[in-house]
Image (cartoon, rainbow, N blue to C red):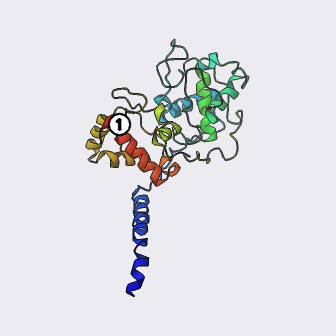
Amino acid sequence: MNRALPYATPLVPAFVVIGFFVWFANWIPQTRWEPPKVQAISAALTPTELAEVGRTIVRQRGCLACHTIEPGAGVKGGGRGPNLAGVAARRAQGVKGGPGNLVDYLAQALYEPGAYLVEGYADIMPPSMAAPASLGYEEAVAVIAYLQSLGKTPTVKVGDVPRPAAGARSAQPAGVATSDPAAMFAALACNGCHSLKAGETLVGPALDAAGIKQAAAERGMGPEAFLMESIVDPKAYERKGFPSGVMPQDYGTRMNAMQLAALVRHLAAQGGQR
């Protein structure tokens, strides 16, 4: 019996390591995010009525967290995305090398926002059929009607706009291939909404060390626990003064436990503080 012990001893560290990662994976909050309630839209609605529904959707689904509607400000405006005021007039002929009419251009902008980027803007917008907007087809048509009204008279009705490709609504973004935290921060487009510089506010709060510690204290948590919760369950705590429901809800499924831990450590160490 005693002779078997030396052979078993080397297995102990392995079991400890495996046990740690099993514990860590189960410690990460397992969340189920429910998308916004789908708007009830009848095919009998006129383009003007659809546009009014679309106006509500644009405001409820977080579109104005990045886009502004500033008449007379041109395409730039003051947002993280292009100004929507006058978009129907600007894109009446679509875009060069892409859709040649307004409706097809707007549909592409909702279904495949990265297919055409306005100069000066990054590819940070998720497809509108996916989280956080999670638009249904009829809702997308209503949004298109509303965007048509920003510079022209809306004309579309349900059925006039092509539907997105099959499976577009349920398609999930790919997982992150790198384990380098700085590269993950960029790959997940975190830098489109969060700055690592103190006092620099984009769509979401800056992720400098002092700001993280303050937010964690408000939540009654340590910085690393707060960051972990914010990544895997962003709706658990949303800071006042920032748009609600904009941050993607699926980061906890796009990274494994080791990647999450590395990203959390990287963010907690901003400014040389822990």
Q: In the orientation shown, which residue stands out farthest toward the bottom?
A: 1
Q: Quadrant of the N terminus?
A: bottom left
92 up-or-down from 170: above or below: above
Q: Which residue: 67% across, 47% down? A: 167
Q: Quadrant of the C terminus?
A: top left
Q: Secondary structure at mark 1?
A: helix
Q: Nearer the viewer, residue 246 or 117?
A: 117
Please name whichever residue, 102 or 23, is drawn nearer the observer in this view of the structure: 23
Q: Which residue is mark 1?
A: 270
In the image: residue 14, left or right of residue 148: left
Residue 86's spot in the image, x, y percent? 58, 17
Picture quadrant of residue 75? top right
In the rendered image, the vertical position of residue 88 relative to residue 266, given as above or below: above
The residue positioned 60% from the left and 33% from the top of the image is 142
Residue 220 visible in this rendered orientation of the protein: yes
> What's the residue at 40%, 59% (across, down)?
24
Frontmost residue, 79 versus 182: 182
Label 1 is placed on what type of residue? Gln
